[in-house]
Every structure is written in C-alpha cells, then in structure tokens.
Image (spheres, rainbow, N blue to C red):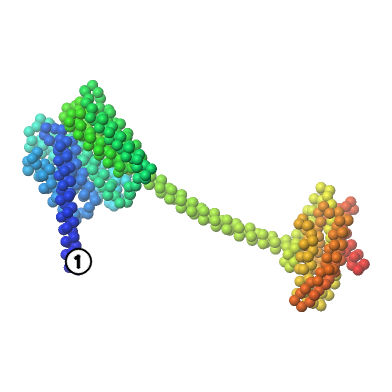
Amino acid sequence: MEKQSVALLKTSAVKYALLLPLLAFFYIALGKLSLGFATMPEGIAVVWFPNGLLLALFLLRPYKEWIWYILMVIPAELIADIPQFSVSQALQFACVNLGETLSSAYLLRKIAGSERSFHNTQYVLFFIIIALALVPSISAIFGALIYHTQIETQTDFMAFWRIWFFGDSLGILLLTPLIVSWFDTSRKLFISKHYLSETLLTNALIILLSIAIFAQSFNASILPTTPIIFILLSLWVVYRQGLRLSMVLGFFIGLIGVYFTVNHQGPFSVFDAVQNTLYLQEFIAAMMTSILFFGVLLRQINDKNEEILEVNKALHTLTSELEKRVDEKTEALQKANAKLQELVTKDALTGIYNRYYFQHYFTQEVARASRHSYALSIILFDIDYFKKINDTYGHQAGDEVLISLSQAILKRLRMEDIFARIGGEEFIIILSHIDGERAKCLAEEIRALVASLCIETQTYEIRCTISLGVSSLGKRINSFESLFADADSKLYQAKELG
C-alpha cells in the first residue's frame, strides 16, 4: 500500500512538472498578447485572455488541483506584466485575477452542480450572470482602483472600471466556453466529408471579410454599423457547424477586430481611445453572447428532436411489435373461426357438409332459383342395408364405408354442387342449374359408381349399393319442403322396386 502511494505521488509530480510549465507558457503568451492590444496610454487591455484560460482550468479540473494552478499564476503574471507594470502592481493584478476566476469557478460549480456543460441553457445563463457580469464587475472595482491610484492618468475611475470589466468578461467569453467545450467528451465533434469543404471555405471567407472591413480607414461621418454583419454570419455558422466551431470563428473575428482597432483602423477608429475600446468591447460581447445563446438553444432543440426521434423509433418498434401480435392474434382468430365454421358446417366423419349447412343453404338456394328462374334439382340417397353392414363387419367398418363412399362421389361432382350427409347413412346432393333429366343421368352414374366400389377395410372387402330419389324445382314442386318430400318419396319407391 505504501509503495502504491509513493508511486502515485511520483506520477503526480511528473504530471505537474510537465503540465504547469506548459500552462505557465500559455498564460504568459496570452498575457503578452492581451497587453499588446492595449489601446490606452495607461496600458489597460481591451481583452484580458489569461483569465479565460484560468477559469477554464478551474472549471475542468478538481478542487485538489487548484493550488497548483494558483502557484503557477503568480510567477506567470509577473513575467507577463513586467516591465510594463511594476512588481507590486503585477502582484496586485495576479491577486485580482485569481480572486475573480476562483470565485467564478466556485460559484458555478456549486450552483450548477453536475450540469456543467455549455450545451445546457441553464448553465450558460449561470455562466453569463456569474462569470461575465457579477464577479467581473466586482473585480473591476479593484482593478480600476489600482490604475486610478497608482498610475498617473487623466482617465476617470468609471472609464477604467468599464474597460476592465469588459476586458475581463471578453477574455472569459472568448476563451472559457471554447476550451471547456472542446474538452467536453460527451459531445463529439464530427464533420462529414460532405460538409468539410463547406466549413473550411465558409470560415475562410468570413475571416477574410473581417480583415477587409477592419483594415479599412473610416472617417467620423461614417457610422460603425458594418461589424453587425459578423453577428449574423456567426449565427449562420452556429446553425451549420455547431457551437464549438462558431466560437473558434468568433475568437478570430474578435482578435482581428482588436488588432486593427488598436492600430487606428476599422469602424471604431473614428472615436477617441476610450470610446473605441468600449465600442469594440461591446461589439465582441454582443457577437460572442449571441453565438453562445443561439448555439446552446439550437443544441437544446436538436437534443429534444433527437429525444423525439428516439421516442418515435421506440414507438414505431412497439407499434410494429403490437401490429405483429395483433396480426398473429387475428390470424389465430381467423383460423379458429374457420375451424369453428368447419365444425358447424362440416360432417366430422366424412368431411362433407352436414345437415345444418344443408338446411341453411338449401332454403336460400330454393328461394334464389325461384326468384331468378333457373333449374334446381336434388338427389337424395341412402345406403342399402347399412345396418346389416354395421352388424356384420362392425361400426368401424361402417364408418370406413361412409368415408370411402363420400369421397368417391365428391370427386364426381362439380365444385358448385353441395354434397351433404343429413343422417346416419342418408345423403343429399344439391344441383344448381341442373334440370330433372340431367339430374337423373347423374343419379344413375352415382348409383353405378357406388355399385362398382370395393371398399377395403383392415379385415374385409365390402361392397354396397344405394337407393336414390331425384326431384327438380317446378310449378308443382316450388318450395323447400315439397322438393325434399318429393325426392324422399322417390327414394322409397326405388327401395321398394329394389
């Protein structure tokens, strides 16, 4: 355990030994860059970039690492400020900057909790209120006091306060969201090949346009309205490319604006030093705040759309599954209904229609034939001496006779003919559009067919005959009852005649 602790300390020492000099280098470079953009004789900067880097570190890293960054800032601030400022003034600036960034980071982490992402609307609002407004306005009091009391100047205290306030806020606005967003692992930056050329070309053209506008010389008769175009272009870039790339673009536009303004060029150069500084700061603040707000709102809308798409996808999957189940249930129900219908209408033994279906169909068919005046005949028959077959060969053999006879006759009939078993060994055939003579011919064919059958059971070979009665719909026989009674009468006449 002790060896692991020693190894961990060595690893941490190596990490900070490499990281802190690198961070100090960037802090000093950003400080020199900021002081290089000073527009006032007193040396106050238009934008103070180091605070943006420092606040990003405090927001990204845990509390236990903060002490290392605090120790790094003090010597880095001295190197960045000297010789433009004295050691005493540089130390005071370091304390003010540390107080500002530490307070902002602590308040943001406490209030926002775990939702520390610049893609979250609430967090962006907290960031603007705390890190861009509240804390910089307080630190600007101390900064302005240092300038006003320790440097000979004709500039009043409130002008110092405003420029310090905007300078710190802009440095934080330009760098902190940019750095934190790029290290936000929950949001992957992906640019497809299709949009890569568009992204590069668009950003290059906007940067060239910013150079063209800010590099011009303006006179006092021209109002500084042209920079507004960059706010609109930046919003379009946010829409097309997302928050992170648009913030990079905003950073470079701001940098270009500062560079040319301090060199007395661009739309703001028509004013005096204090005014052009304030107008430039307000322009950069308006542009970057618009980018930040529009970007986070767009991200929230896209997130909600993605949630809706996911919900729709889940609903579609659920609906498809429900539809599948409904289809399965419907199919099963249809099969069950078909089976039930078969049980209701079919004879269980022979598979042909039963008495219930015969009566239902026959009644309707007689009515239709009478109404439309087409021929209708029936053949009623039963098996001769069927009781003797059952008594001699057994009921199983009798069932096989019924089945074999039914199937043989069914093959001889038309598809539209109705063949039904209406009693134990009694059958009926309904023949639509068949007159009496043709029905008699068919009856004779069926009689001969049955007489020729040799029905083989497991034990016996059985032969049988049938007696038939044929009747057709006519003037005298014009109802269900009379047609069936006439066929039944002829059946028994045939039996008597043998």
Question: Amino acid under label 1?
Answer: Gln
In this orientation, which residue lies closer to the viewer: 57 or 456? 456
Tell me if 441 is positioned left or right of 332 in this view.
Answer: right
Q: Is residue 226 above or below residue 459?
A: above
Q: Quadrant of residue 297?
A: top left
Determine if residue 482 is in view: no
Q: Is residue 250 above or below residue 16?
A: above
**Which residue is pictured at 79% across the width and 63% down the height?**
409
Q: Is residue 328 above or below residue 269?
A: below
Residue 245 image offset from top left, x and y in percent: 30, 42
In this orientation, which residue lies closer to the viewer: 249 or 178? 249
Residue 411 image offset from top left, x and y in percent: 77, 62
Secondary structure found at label 1:
helix
Q: Quadrant of residue 240?
A: top left
Q: Is residue 355 above or below residue 455?
A: above
Q: Which quadrant of the rendered structure holds the N terminus?
A: bottom left
Q: Which residue is mark 1?
A: 4
Tell me if 202 is positioned left or right of 49 in this view.
Answer: right
**Which residue is pictured at 89% across the width and 62% down the height?**
490
**Which residue is pictured at 72% across the width and 66% down the height?**
348
Residue 154 image offset from top left, x and y in percent: 10, 30
**Which residue is pictured at 76% across the width and 68% down the height?**
403
